[in-house]
Amino acid sequence: MDKNQQQLLLEIEKLNKAQVRIKRKTTFMLCIIALLVLITSTMAWFTLNSFSSVENIQMDITTGVDLRVDMENHGSDIELYKKTITNEMINGYLTSKGKDTLADQLLDPVTTRNGIAFESENGSTRQPNETSYLEFECYFIASKDMWVHLSSDDANDMEGTSVSTTETGLKAEIVQAVRVSFENSGDAVIYEPNKSGSAVNGQTTFDLQTPMVYSNDTRLFHLNELEPIKVTIRVWAEGNDPQCDDDVQSANLTFNLLFSGTDENNVAFG
């Protein structure tokens, strides 16, 4: 073997060693990236203990023109329905199911894709009103055909839809970590209050503008004249939301939900 051949073999050997080193570095970097992705995906879920969870929930539900609501089905007699659902009415519903009242209800972080079925961080199924997520049923009825929306506008001495807290600092971020879904006939629409980024876990969510802009995206369900429908309302702390971390544990929440009706062109009544 002449010197040129020896030199060529040495160069090939150096090149092979360099490629091995590059592969090792690439593999190491990929492992680091995978670890960072894993950490990023799990940081949002706050650590559970006996003193954690979102607590002290206040819920005010009101309806606009030509629209009524109740926690019982009174058939087509619209006069038996109300303009407001109070905390006391929701508490009555919860205690009839053997569950805690709103004051004692805790929201552990859970997640969902459709606003109906919920899981914990490890993928186990979670049940409503059991230190997990809040669930209750309402019956809506209208004096005319309408599409029902949440509204952010104040109307007739009623506050528009909002989710707020008296907390300060990082704990106040709880208002970005919660969700509310409205299910009718197996389909749910998810309201993401104070939405600041992309929806998580494959969810399709909407937020409200102020002043209110009605659109197909803000529709919750449709009502035919004097035909009541059952709507299941669920409230949860979304574990995959970046704000759902240890900073928001034990926070308080106030929900104002104002329902308004529009015609098929999304023009508000009244």
Image (tube, helix red, strand yellow):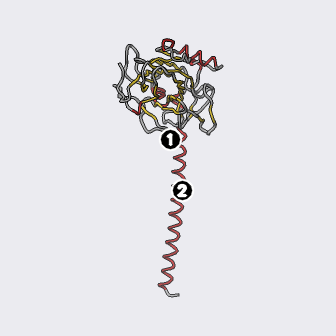
Three-letter code for the amino acid on which mark 1 is drawn: Gly
Secondary structure beneath dot 1 equals loop
| Residue 135 x/y as whole percent | 57, 25
Give the residue at mark 1: 202
Residue at 55% in and 14% down: 89
Discs 2, 1 touching: Cβ within 8 Å: no
Residue at 55% in and 40% down: 42
Residue at 39% in and 29% down: 208
Three-letter code for the amino acid on which mark 2 is drawn: Phe
Residue 215 versus residue 151: which sits nearer the camera? 215
Q: Is residue 53 above or below residue 68?
A: below
| Residue 231 x/y as whole percent | 52, 25
Q: Earlier in the sequence, mark 2 or mark 1?
A: 2
Please state, as top left, top right, bottom left or bottom right, where the C terminus lies in the image. top left
Residue 206 versus residue 77: which sits nearer the camera? 77
Secondary structure beneath dot 2 equals helix
Work out which residue is located at the far bottom of the displayed protein and give it: 2
Q: Please state which of the two labelled residues, at mark 2 or mark 1, is closer to the viewer.
A: 1
Label 2: few (<14), some or many (≥20) within 10 Å? Answer: few
| Residue 140 x/y as whole percent | 49, 21
Spatial CA span between label 2 and label 1: 30 Å
Q: Is residue 238 above or below residue 69?
A: below
Position of 179 with respect to 97 (left or right) is: left
Label 1: few (<14), some or many (≥20) within 10 Å? Answer: few
Residue at 53% in and 27% down: 235
Position of 192 with respect to 127 (left or right) is: left
Give the residue at mark 2: 28
| Residue 24 x/y as whole percent | 54, 61
